[in-house]
Amino acid sequence: MAGGDLKYRHLSRSSSHRQSLLRNLVTSLITHESIRTTWPKAKEAQPVVEKLITLGKKNTNASRNRAEQIFFQPWDHLPKLFGELRKRYMDRPGGYTRVLRIEPINRNNDQAPSAILELVDGPRDMRFAMTAKSIAHERSTGIGLRDITARNVAKVTRYRKNGTRELEALVRTMRKWKPRLTEAWRMKETWEEVDEKKRREAERKGEVWVKKHSHGERDPNTGRRKGGDDPFEK
Protein backbone atom coordinates (compact mmCIF):
# COMPACT_ATOMS: atom_id res chain seq x y z
CA MET A 1 0.00 0.00 0.00
CA ALA A 2 1.41 3.38 -0.99
CA GLY A 3 2.40 5.56 1.94
CA GLY A 4 2.34 2.71 4.47
CA ASP A 5 4.99 1.99 7.09
CA LEU A 6 8.08 0.09 5.95
CA LYS A 7 8.49 -3.38 7.43
CA TYR A 8 12.26 -3.33 6.88
CA ARG A 9 15.08 -1.01 5.88
CA HIS A 10 15.81 -0.94 2.16
CA LEU A 11 19.43 0.14 2.87
CA SER A 12 19.37 2.17 -0.40
CA ARG A 13 19.71 -1.01 -2.43
CA SER A 14 17.67 -3.11 -4.79
CA SER A 15 16.05 -6.29 -3.52
CA SER A 16 18.73 -8.61 -4.93
CA HIS A 17 21.59 -6.40 -3.74
CA ARG A 18 20.05 -6.15 -0.26
CA GLN A 19 19.72 -9.94 0.02
CA SER A 20 23.34 -10.43 -1.08
CA LEU A 21 24.49 -7.87 1.48
CA LEU A 22 22.63 -9.57 4.33
CA ARG A 23 23.91 -13.00 3.30
CA ASN A 24 27.48 -11.68 3.34
CA LEU A 25 26.99 -10.13 6.79
CA VAL A 26 25.51 -13.35 8.15
CA THR A 27 28.34 -15.42 6.70
CA SER A 28 30.96 -13.11 8.21
CA LEU A 29 29.26 -13.22 11.60
CA ILE A 30 29.07 -17.02 11.67
CA THR A 31 32.75 -17.17 10.67
CA HIS A 32 34.23 -14.49 12.98
CA GLU A 33 31.41 -14.26 15.61
CA SER A 34 31.85 -10.47 15.76
CA ILE A 35 31.72 -7.89 12.97
CA ARG A 36 31.68 -4.11 12.70
CA THR A 37 29.25 -2.45 10.33
CA THR A 38 26.73 0.38 10.25
CA TRP A 39 23.85 0.44 12.70
CA PRO A 40 21.06 -0.09 10.10
CA LYS A 41 22.88 -3.04 8.51
CA ALA A 42 23.47 -4.65 11.90
CA LYS A 43 19.80 -4.31 12.87
CA GLU A 44 18.67 -5.83 9.57
CA ALA A 45 21.14 -8.73 9.73
CA GLN A 46 20.32 -9.55 13.36
CA PRO A 47 16.92 -11.26 12.77
CA VAL A 48 18.39 -13.23 9.85
CA VAL A 49 21.09 -14.64 12.13
CA GLU A 50 18.55 -15.39 14.86
CA LYS A 51 16.41 -17.42 12.43
CA LEU A 52 19.50 -19.18 11.07
CA ILE A 53 20.60 -20.33 14.53
CA THR A 54 17.05 -21.52 15.21
CA LEU A 55 17.32 -23.67 12.08
CA GLY A 56 20.58 -25.06 13.41
CA LYS A 57 18.94 -26.00 16.70
CA LYS A 58 16.15 -27.89 14.90
CA ASN A 59 18.75 -29.97 13.01
CA THR A 60 16.34 -31.49 10.50
CA ASN A 61 16.66 -32.11 6.77
CA ALA A 62 14.29 -29.21 6.08
CA SER A 63 16.29 -26.83 8.28
CA ARG A 64 19.55 -27.90 6.61
CA ASN A 65 18.10 -27.28 3.17
CA ARG A 66 16.88 -23.85 4.25
CA ALA A 67 20.29 -22.94 5.76
CA GLU A 68 22.04 -24.00 2.55
CA GLN A 69 20.05 -21.36 0.68
CA ILE A 70 21.44 -18.59 2.91
CA PHE A 71 25.17 -19.39 2.80
CA PHE A 72 27.15 -18.81 -0.38
CA GLN A 73 29.48 -21.67 0.60
CA PRO A 74 27.37 -23.94 2.81
CA TRP A 75 29.99 -26.70 2.99
CA ASP A 76 32.25 -24.32 4.98
CA HIS A 77 29.65 -22.98 7.44
CA LEU A 78 27.02 -25.66 7.97
CA PRO A 79 29.30 -27.81 10.19
CA LYS A 80 29.79 -24.91 12.61
CA LEU A 81 26.11 -23.95 12.56
CA PHE A 82 24.81 -27.47 13.21
CA GLY A 83 27.72 -28.37 15.47
CA GLU A 84 29.40 -25.80 17.72
CA LEU A 85 26.67 -23.14 17.65
CA ARG A 86 23.87 -25.68 18.07
CA LYS A 87 25.49 -27.04 21.24
CA ARG A 88 26.21 -23.55 22.57
CA TYR A 89 22.63 -22.30 22.25
CA MET A 90 20.71 -25.51 22.89
CA ASP A 91 19.51 -24.31 26.32
CA ARG A 92 19.05 -20.66 25.35
CA PRO A 93 15.47 -19.82 24.29
CA GLY A 94 16.51 -16.88 22.11
CA GLY A 95 18.64 -13.78 21.92
CA TYR A 96 21.67 -15.32 20.25
CA THR A 97 23.07 -12.01 18.98
CA ARG A 98 23.80 -8.58 20.40
CA VAL A 99 24.15 -5.17 18.73
CA LEU A 100 26.41 -2.63 20.46
CA ARG A 101 26.70 0.97 19.33
CA ILE A 102 30.24 2.26 18.78
CA GLU A 103 31.90 5.39 17.45
CA PRO A 104 31.49 5.92 13.70
CA ILE A 105 33.94 3.81 11.70
CA ASN A 106 34.38 6.87 9.48
CA ARG A 107 35.73 4.98 6.47
CA ASN A 108 34.34 7.55 4.01
CA ASN A 109 34.20 10.48 6.45
CA ASP A 110 30.39 10.25 6.49
CA GLN A 111 30.05 9.78 10.28
CA ALA A 112 27.53 6.98 9.71
CA PRO A 113 26.20 5.41 12.94
CA SER A 114 28.21 2.23 13.51
CA ALA A 115 27.72 -0.87 15.62
CA ILE A 116 29.20 -4.24 16.53
CA LEU A 117 27.10 -7.30 15.75
CA GLU A 118 28.26 -10.29 17.80
CA LEU A 119 27.23 -13.75 18.93
CA VAL A 120 26.64 -13.95 22.66
CA ASP A 121 28.36 -16.45 24.98
CA GLY A 122 31.23 -16.83 22.50
CA PRO A 123 34.96 -16.20 22.71
CA ARG A 124 34.51 -12.66 21.37
CA ASP A 125 31.61 -11.62 23.61
CA MET A 126 32.39 -7.97 24.33
CA ARG A 127 29.91 -7.55 27.19
CA PHE A 128 31.45 -10.57 28.93
CA ALA A 129 34.90 -8.94 28.75
CA MET A 130 33.56 -5.52 29.80
CA THR A 131 31.82 -7.08 32.80
CA ALA A 132 35.06 -8.78 33.87
CA LYS A 133 36.89 -5.46 33.55
CA SER A 134 34.27 -3.73 35.71
CA ILE A 135 34.52 -6.44 38.38
CA ALA A 136 38.32 -6.15 38.49
CA HIS A 137 38.12 -2.37 38.85
CA GLU A 138 35.44 -2.38 41.52
CA ARG A 139 37.20 -5.05 43.56
CA SER A 140 40.41 -3.01 43.49
CA THR A 141 38.57 0.01 44.96
CA GLY A 142 37.21 -2.08 47.84
CA ILE A 143 33.65 -0.75 47.61
CA GLY A 144 32.10 -3.92 46.22
CA LEU A 145 30.11 -4.55 43.06
CA ARG A 146 27.59 -2.00 41.84
CA ASP A 147 24.02 -3.05 41.10
CA ILE A 148 24.45 -2.65 37.35
CA THR A 149 27.58 -4.83 37.42
CA ALA A 150 25.76 -7.53 39.39
CA ARG A 151 22.94 -7.51 36.82
CA ASN A 152 25.46 -7.82 33.98
CA VAL A 153 27.10 -10.77 35.72
CA ALA A 154 23.74 -12.53 35.86
CA LYS A 155 23.11 -11.80 32.18
CA VAL A 156 26.46 -12.97 30.79
CA THR A 157 26.66 -16.14 32.90
CA ARG A 158 23.03 -17.30 32.83
CA TYR A 159 23.23 -19.53 29.74
CA ARG A 160 27.00 -19.68 29.29
CA LYS A 161 28.48 -23.07 30.08
CA ASN A 162 30.94 -22.70 32.98
CA GLY A 163 30.24 -18.98 32.75
CA THR A 164 30.98 -18.16 36.39
CA ARG A 165 34.31 -20.00 36.27
CA GLU A 166 35.36 -18.37 33.00
CA LEU A 167 34.36 -14.92 34.25
CA GLU A 168 36.36 -15.32 37.45
CA ALA A 169 39.42 -16.49 35.48
CA LEU A 170 39.18 -13.43 33.22
CA VAL A 171 38.85 -11.14 36.24
CA ARG A 172 42.01 -12.59 37.80
CA THR A 173 43.86 -12.07 34.52
CA MET A 174 42.82 -8.42 34.35
CA ARG A 175 43.77 -7.79 37.98
CA LYS A 176 47.26 -9.14 37.30
CA TRP A 177 47.74 -6.91 34.25
CA LYS A 178 46.48 -3.70 35.83
CA PRO A 179 49.53 -3.02 38.09
CA ARG A 180 51.88 -3.73 35.17
CA LEU A 181 50.05 -1.30 32.91
CA THR A 182 50.03 1.37 35.62
CA GLU A 183 53.76 0.95 36.24
CA ALA A 184 54.52 1.08 32.51
CA TRP A 185 52.46 4.24 32.13
CA ARG A 186 54.33 5.94 34.99
CA MET A 187 57.66 5.07 33.34
CA LYS A 188 56.53 6.43 30.00
CA GLU A 189 57.72 9.92 29.09
CA THR A 190 55.11 12.60 28.62
CA TRP A 191 54.84 14.53 25.36
CA GLU A 192 56.20 17.64 27.09
CA GLU A 193 59.29 15.74 28.26
CA VAL A 194 59.92 14.40 24.76
CA ASP A 195 59.58 17.89 23.26
CA GLU A 196 61.95 19.33 25.86
CA LYS A 197 64.53 16.64 25.09
CA LYS A 198 64.34 17.42 21.38
CA ARG A 199 64.69 21.14 22.05
CA ARG A 200 67.82 20.64 24.18
CA GLU A 201 69.32 18.35 21.55
CA ALA A 202 68.73 20.99 18.87
CA GLU A 203 70.32 23.72 21.04
CA ARG A 204 73.37 21.53 21.60
CA LYS A 205 73.80 21.30 17.81
CA GLY A 206 73.23 25.03 17.38
CA GLU A 207 69.92 24.58 15.61
CA VAL A 208 66.45 25.98 16.17
CA TRP A 209 63.84 23.35 16.96
CA VAL A 210 60.26 23.96 15.90
CA LYS A 211 57.53 21.60 16.99
CA LYS A 212 55.75 19.96 14.04
CA HIS A 213 52.92 17.53 13.73
CA SER A 214 54.03 13.92 13.27
CA HIS A 215 52.05 13.74 10.02
CA GLY A 216 53.13 17.15 8.70
CA GLU A 217 51.38 20.48 8.53
CA ARG A 218 47.78 20.61 7.35
CA ASP A 219 47.05 22.47 4.13
CA PRO A 220 44.27 25.02 4.88
CA ASN A 221 42.85 24.62 1.36
CA THR A 222 42.74 20.83 0.92
CA GLY A 223 42.80 19.76 4.58
CA ARG A 224 45.57 17.23 3.86
CA ARG A 225 48.91 17.14 5.64
CA LYS A 226 52.21 17.71 3.90
CA GLY A 227 55.68 16.70 4.92
CA GLY A 228 54.59 13.86 7.19
CA ASP A 229 53.87 10.16 6.90
CA ASP A 230 50.57 10.56 5.06
CA PRO A 231 50.42 7.54 2.68
CA PHE A 232 48.20 9.48 0.28
CA GLU A 233 50.62 12.38 -0.01
CA LYS A 234 53.02 11.51 -2.83
Image (cartoon, grey):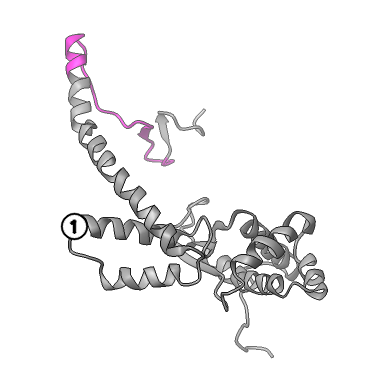
Magenta run includes residue 209: yes
**Image position, residue 55 (x, y; %):** 71, 73
Name above or below for residue 183 compared with residue 127.
Answer: above
| Residue 102 seen in render | no
**Image position, residue 173 (x, y; %):** 36, 48
Please give left or right for residue 181 compared with residue 127 in the image. left
Q: Main secondary structure of the magenta part?
A: loop
In the image, 35 versus 130, the foreground residue is 130
* Image quadrant in which you'd find residue 13: bottom right
Name above or below for residue 106 compared with residue 150.
Answer: above
**Image position, residue 141 (x, y; %):** 18, 57
Residue span colored magenta: 200-223
Q: Looking at the image, which residue is at 44% across and 58% down?
A: 166
* Image quadrant in which you'd find residue 65: bottom right
The residue that disc 1 covers is 141
| Residue 126 seen in render | yes
* Image quadrant in which you'd find residue 207: top left
Magenta run includes residue 112: no
Q: Looking at the image, which residue is at 67% across and 89% down?
A: 2
Please give left or right for residue 209 compared with residue 37 in the image. left
Instruction: Inspect the image, locate mark 1, and give the three-letter code of the amino acid beneath it.
Output: Thr
